[in-house]
Image (cartoon, grey):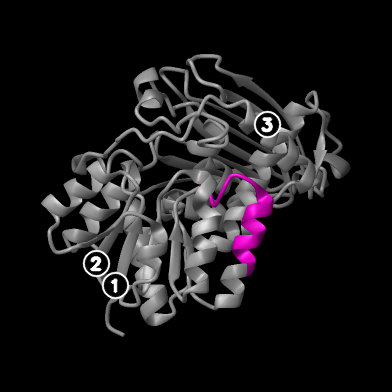
């Protein structure tokens, strides 16, 4: 195989952007051959603008097309696992938009299907392509920062207007989307948080519903975490603050990282702080450190994930964002919801997925979303700038 024939399921905001990118041959080794959506207006537009593509009005028909090697799933979140499982069963490679689904139990089923299929499974965590996040991960995971003490991420520059939420009838509803800022915008940051610092052992959360918008889900969230070694974490995000902040600070026994405004600052202690604390005879002690700054313009974003996906299929290149890892950030957001729904209780990981599913079902049953379709489409010029890291 020297190229991968790929189909896109769901051609709303993200799907139409991926379609434009692939149709214009911006990813080596991936050739777009088919598109699918239940909205006939969208299909007519695809047929008009991309007449050589095969169009399908349901995903089963596309998956039955034996000429298609792989699929991109960019439908509303609650359908990700269902379609992915069906795709793996028919021998397709799968790249799913984030989040991997809306509940951990669905992600577990999808992971099981991917393992059985032995096909490539990727997820669109495009911010993993940013060189500064990669460097921060390397520093932390190598032990260069020592034992972690604390991480604090304030990421409130996900500002959205009411018009954004009104652009799709499924958006910001429990039944249609499965959550708010934690399910739509913050999955990128939750993924990077655990990718760099690892998974915690407990989550306590405070989530505000419709604090800034007329929606039925949260648009403001504060999450507190604890880790096995006693370290703590704080994660704050919102779609209702302007100007927003994007600042990640990670403290360890051997120094500190601060990532903000496109600069990664690294203070490297010349002595372990714990040893200085125990052994110094001085009450007030300044530990000597070395300071390094890292900057990078490298971030291939969505195209980078698509290119990596193609190379994984064609050359068995390691996936930068394996789909199996999508369950980690979803575990954090699910635990945060569960904490809020149980009176801001501390939730130990792993949590009771059956309890979460039952409580989410109650939310969905009372949801305003009725399943109707409202057309939404992305602009090609936004493809690079819209979803890259914003400092």
- How many other residues sit within 10 Å of disc 1, few (<14), some (14-19) or many (≥20)? some
Q: CA distance from mark 2 to mark 1?
A: 6 Å
Magenta range is: 99-112
User: Please, what is the dominant secondary structure of the magenta stretch?
Assistant: helix
Residue 336 location, x and y as percent? 69, 35
Which quadrant holds residue 288? top right
Secondary structure at badge 1 equals strand
Q: Say which mark, if any, is on residue 159.
A: none
Q: Nearer the viewer, mark 1 or mark 3?
A: 1
Nearest the camera: 276 or 47? 47
Disc 3 designates what residue? 223
As drawn, 181 above or below 43: above
- How many other residues sit within 10 Å of disc 2, few (<14), some (14-19) or many (≥20)? many
Whether residue 163 is visible, yes or no, is yes
Secondary structure at badge 2 equals strand
N-terminal-most mark, 1 or 3? 1
| Residue at image point 74% right, 49% down | 272
């Amino acid at each position: 195989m020297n190229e991968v024939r790929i189909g896109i399921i769901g051609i709303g905001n993200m799907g139409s952007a991926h379609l434009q990118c692939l149709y214009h041959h911006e990813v080596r080794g991936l050739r777009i051959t088919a598109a699918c959506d239940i909205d006939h207006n969208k299909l007519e537009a695809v047929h008009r603008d991309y007449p050589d593509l095969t169009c399908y009005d349901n995903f089963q028909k596309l998956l039955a097309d034996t000429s298609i090697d792989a699929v991109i799933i960019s439908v509303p979140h609650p359908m990700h696992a269902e379609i992915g499982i069906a795709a793996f069963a028919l021998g397709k490679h799968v790249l799913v938009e984030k989040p991997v689904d809306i509940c951990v139990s669905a992600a577990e089923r999808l992971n099981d299907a991917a393992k059985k299929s032995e096909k490539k499974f990727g997820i669109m965590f495009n911010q993993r392509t940013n060189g500064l996040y990669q460097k921060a991960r390397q520093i932390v995971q190598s032990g260069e920062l020592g034992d972690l003490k604390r991480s604090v991420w304030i990421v409130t520059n996900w500002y959205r207007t009411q018009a954004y939420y009104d652009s799709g009838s499924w958006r910001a509803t429990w039944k249609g989307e499965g959550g708010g800022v934690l399910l739509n915008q913050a999955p990128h940051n939750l993924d990077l948080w655990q990718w760099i610092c690892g998974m915690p052992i407990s989550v306590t959360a405070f989530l505000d519903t419709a604090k800034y918008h007329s929606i039925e889900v949260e648009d403001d969230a504060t999450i507190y975490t604890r880790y096995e070694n006693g370290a703590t974490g704080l994660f704050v995000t919102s779609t209702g603050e302007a100007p927003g902040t994007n600042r990640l600070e990670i403290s360890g026994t051997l120094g500190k990282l601060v990532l903000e405004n496109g600069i990664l600052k690294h203070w490297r202690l010349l002595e372990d702080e714990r040893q200085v604390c125990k052994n110094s005879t001085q009450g007030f002690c300044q530990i000597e450190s070395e300071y390094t700054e890292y900057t990078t313009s490298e971030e291939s974003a969505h195209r980078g994930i698509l290119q990596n996906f193609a190379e994984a299929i064609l050359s068995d290149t390691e996936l930068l964002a394996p789909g199996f890892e999508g369950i980690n950030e979803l575990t954090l957001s699910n635990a945060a919801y569960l904490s809020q729904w149980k009176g801001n209780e501390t939730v130990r990981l792993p949590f009771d997925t059956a309890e979460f599913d039952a409580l989410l079902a109650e939310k969905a049953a009372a949801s305003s979303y009725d399943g109707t379709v409202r057309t939404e489409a992305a602009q090609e010029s936004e493809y690079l700038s819209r979803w890259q890291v914003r400092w």
